Amino acid sequence: MLCKSPITRRSILSVLLTFILSNGVFCQNILKPISFVNSPDLSAQINMYDTKHYNYLSNRYVATIKSASQNINCPEGTWEIHTSVERVEKRTGVFDVAVAFNCNRGNFPNASVSVNLTFSDWSAANYVLFPGAVYKGNRFDWRRIAYSPKLLDPRDIGPGKQQIISDIPKLNFQDGPSKIQERSGSMSTPGVGFYSDKLHSVCWILTEQGTELGDYGISIEETNDRQQATISITAPVVREVYKYHLTDMRYPSDDKTINFKQGDAVTIKFRIYEFKSGNLQGLFNQFATIRKDLSLPDTLSTILPFSSAFKVQEKKFNELNFVSEYGYYAVGARENFLQDWQIGWTGGMISTYPLLVAGSVPTKNNVIKNFDWLFPAGISPSGFFWDSGEGGNRWYGGDIRKPHTADWHLVRKSGDGLYYVIRQLMIMQKLGYPVKDSWRKGTTIVVDAFVNLWKKNGQFGNFINSKSGEIIVGGSASGGIVPGALCLSYKYFGEESYLDIAIKAGDYYNENFVKKGITCGGPGDAMQNPDSESCYALLESYMLLYETTKDNRWLGIAENVAMQFATWVMSYNYMFPLNSLFGRLDLK
């Protein structure tokens, strides 16, 4: 039976559904109260869809789970539901739940089945996390702009504006319907977690990728008053009417339903956890300890040694990427300007680093030519690097496909460029290659541009004007690598002000992003959606702040960022369709 005790303010879920099974039957008299803060109500649901209208939910049959076995009687037939909840051995507050759906009478065309966990002591202030997909519920102001999205309305543009995301899965930051429907396979780890500051508690629900029917659907829906939320696990995934597709939440759903008939069965399994935590960081810290709990045991496929892989890459870069006429490594095959030259981000002055360290003598000489080509021509009037370029002698300030952003330089690009340029200057000294004055002078111009940007604005912003150096779009952690680049600049040039700004920027990012569990602004084509790239850039910066200052405070922050970054990393072997190329190759 479902056991529920009165909600107390001290614990997050008053007493979770505490099922104790013996020989497959609930022991009614041996229930042990388990102190889950925000005890969810558990229910089973049969979903019926109108596939002619993009999987519109035409009907649903819901039954609260009250016993180990019960039926759901529907006009179309009958389902028998078997539920088991077992405490995970030697784990406090951790339970394995399995809900088996057996169709023992009738036919259910265009259907799916769901298990719902309804949390009553809910708040819109709860931080909701779908690993690799949703952070803080993605509960931000948003704009529906086609890919590659850039802000359009002048009222949204400026150094002091709030975070604005594109049209991605999100909970509503205002009044109105608030629901996220995700696919398990779109996450780094299938599952959903949340942190309640009011109840000082972390709750995680993890699943495997899916069942024999395919991926799970994992969703959360809030009531109008935001005092209740329901997390659902659905087999198979069927998103209603719309699904997400490339900055568009209005893309028609084409998820495949199932025609259930008598004798068909499917079991939804998940593991639920609760941890006490006095702060949001606990949500990430605990995830790092459980993220592989449901990963199936497997071995790593060692197909190609890194040394062999590097030789393939070096050959490719020299034959296809190197532009001998001008002496630079393009970031791609040069089929368009984005694949010709971009500083940082997509590879400009990044790919040259391993080529310099591990390449042959001719390759190293090509890297030297790349430096000669970049300095000083690759520096814009603002003092930052030119954003991109084409043909070896045409430089662009931003995205020329969108005229209003033609001079919008992604600050992360110059941050990456500076970081890797200085790394390579240091390597050249060790290798005995002379560092030319033009390279040093050009590098100090970029460093000083960052210093002046900070002194004027107290931030590095997201996009800056390539000609004036003014911040166009502010906020974000786009410059997450800049404190690290400034630490390297301090080590290389010995200028104290570089380290001073690095420390101030490190504090800024910690207070405004790390402590809030949000990193954004790394990619230039994702507006200010939460992203992994700015997160990892911050990790590198905090480690360099620690290594440079020997202050343990930075090491602690680096550890926090590392735990946050772990949510972006695949924790299991994705099940590719068997008839796909990756499926046939059994890629891990």
Image (cartoon, rainbow, N blue to C red):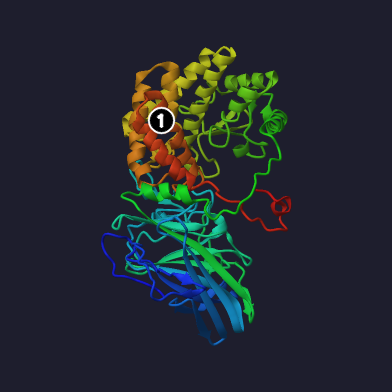
In the visual, does 112 lie left or right of 320? left
**Which one is in front, 54 or 287?**
287
Q: Is residue 70 above or below residue 214?
A: below
Residue 432 in the image: state x and y as whole percent.
Answer: 58, 12
Residue drawn at point x = 50 percent, y = 49 percent: 149
Count the labels in the image: 1
Q: Is residue 100 above or below residue 501?
A: below
**Which one is in front, 474 or 235?**
235
- Judge whether residue 147 can be spotted in this image: yes
**Which one is in front, 4 or 53?**
4
Residue 503 in the image: state x and y as whole percent.
Answer: 34, 29
Find disc 1 in the rendering and name its residue: 483
Q: Secondary structure at mark 1?
A: helix
Residue drawn at point x = 53 percent, y = 46 percent: 569
In the visual, does 228 lie left or right of 418? left
Q: Residue furthest bottom?
A: 75
- How crowded pointer 1 is (Cα within 10 Å; few <14, some 14-19, many 20+) is rated as many
Q: Is residue 37 above or below residue 47?
A: above
- Judge whether residue 239 can be spotted in this image: no
Residue 259 in the image: state x and y as whole percent.
Answer: 63, 77
Residue 67 in the image: state x and y as whole percent.
Answer: 45, 77
**Which one is in front, 20 or 170?**
20
Question: Quadrant of the image for the N terminus?
Answer: bottom left
Specify the amino acid type for callout 1: Pro
Q: Is residue 507 above or below residue 530?
A: above
